[in-house]
Image (cartoon, rainbow, N blue to C red):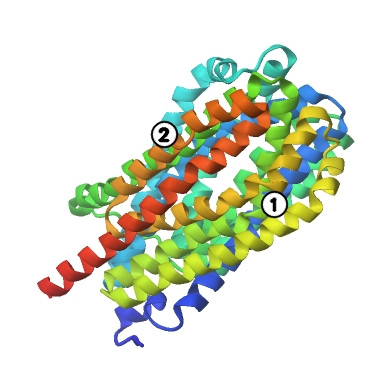
Amino acid sequence: MSRPTSSGTRDAKFTYGSTMRHVLVMTSTGSVGLIAIFLVDFANLFYIAQLGIEELAAAIGYAGTIMFFNSAIGIGLSIAASASVARRIGQGDVKGAHRLVSMSLIISTLISLAVVAGSLAFLDDLAMLLGASGRTLDFTLLFLYIVVPSMPFLVGAMVLSALLRSVGDARGAMFVTLSSGFVTAILDPILIFGFDMGITGAAIASVVSRLVMVGVGLYILIIKHNMLGKPEISKTVSDTVDLFKVATPAMLTNIATPAGNAWIIAEMAQFGDGAVAGFAIVGRIIPVAFGALFALSGAVGPIIGQNFGAMEFDRLSKVVKDSLLLIVIYTLSAWGLLFMLQEPLVQFFNAEGDSASLVFFFCTFAAAGFLFNAALFVTNAVFNNLGFPIYSMLFNWGRATLGTIPFTIAGAYFYQANGVLAGQAIGGVVFAFLAQYVCWRTIDKIRKEKLAAA
């Protein structure tokens, strides 16, 4: 077992100790924060559903799909920040790591501001392209025009949380996301029902929660860790290049998921607002039920990055194996729980007709597909932290296109809305296995090259 031998490696806490323990601690703390946010979104849709207006629930589905594109940018930037900083820490370059922290926050803010400026002009077209019309379109745009301008704060919070994970502060990263859940849980019922603001209240609560997340993240990053390094003009170009080597393909990688979802919701739209509302409900159930798997992909990145920087290849391989074992156990458990709770979930959301049918089908069959989705999440983390983010991009876009479009078209033709969900689940299997094969070949190749060079 490797042990720390210098002040530099002491900062790289993931390069020694039990790999499974690191995976479990990082994943569990990440899960708490993520699931808190997802539970609030879950409750958010519940509150909207209680208003008894189907178009409102459908509007949340359309708006969520469009905002997912914005979130994907933030996820890509956070991946780049975490991978770059963790690798520097693993190499013992703490000063360089802190300098990258500042650069990543500056760059992510500038990029998110540019995205907001560009996307506001096309919100109407995007919503209509997805299939929103009439009152549903009006509700969708009302929500989006309030929430989209706050994207820089969401991206900032994502990057701050990822930076805290890169130094092993799982609790700090958890508190960043927990703060959002806490604020939204309080504001949602007050604004939606107390002030009778409906979907406008839900949007305002989302904006306030993002502001709070950034405040909490900056406080922990600066006060507890003193991680903000002073950018050096002579290093600005090289640091920016290092970040964009991962950030560019990582952003393109994560845009693939909302692109795939946009296709799916457009397929659902042909079956009416009931199907879209049902898909919105499924979209809220997924992150609550499988939040740990979403957290796992972010959790293992810093562990892989530090061990790669320290050339601990045996530990790196063990991290991947531990992650896959956790995926199998967790997915089967969550699927079983969803199967038992499908009736209460349908009643909870007042789902009827096509909406109810879609929820039943997901809980009974389609939820099993997350076994393969999660495996792809882990391979993405491996590729991003080993310096092959282009592989993540190719597999994610393959999954979102070849693994989605033909399967959902066939599913919709034979089994309507339920068939769309089935096609999405089946299409991911091939890409998950292919990604795993390339992942292990890549690890073995890098191991041989690095050890030969040493």
Q: Name the residue under label 1.
A: 181
User: In this view of the protein, which residue sits in the foreground, 117 or 286?
Assistant: 286
Are the residues tagged 1 and 2 within 8 Å (C-beta)?
Answer: no
Left or right of 369 on screen, residue 375: left
Which residue shows up at 80% across the image and 25% down it? 54
| Residue 402: mark in rendering | 2
Callout 1: few (<14), some (14-19), or many (20+) C-alpha neighbours within 10 Å? many
Q: Which residue is most to the left?
A: 453
Asked if 291 appears above or below 446 in the picture, the reply is above
User: In this view of the protein, which residue sits in the foreground, 307 or 97?
Assistant: 307
Which numbered disc, 1 or 2, marks the residue that appears first in the sequence?
Answer: 1
Callout 2: few (<14), some (14-19), or many (20+) C-alpha neighbours within 10 Å? few
Q: What residue type is labelled 1?
A: Gly
Asked if 454 appears above or below 211 in the picture, the reply is below
Q: Which residue is most to the front?
A: 414
Q: Measured from the top left, where is residue 428 in percent x and y?
A: 48, 44
Which residue shows up at 35% across the image and 65% down it? 305
Left or right of 63 on screen, residue 312: left
Q: Measured from the top left, where is residue 20 in percent x and y?
A: 49, 76
Asked if 364 appears above or below 316 in the picture, the reply is above
Asked if 113 appears above or below 451 in the picture, the reply is above
User: In this view of the protein, which residue sits in the foreground, 398 or 89?
Assistant: 398
Q: Tag 2, which secondary structure?
A: loop
User: In this view of the protein, which residue sits in the foreground, 171 or 126?
Assistant: 126
Q: Measured from the top left, where is residue 405 in percent x and y?
A: 48, 29
Examine the image and state in which quarter residue 176 appears: bottom right
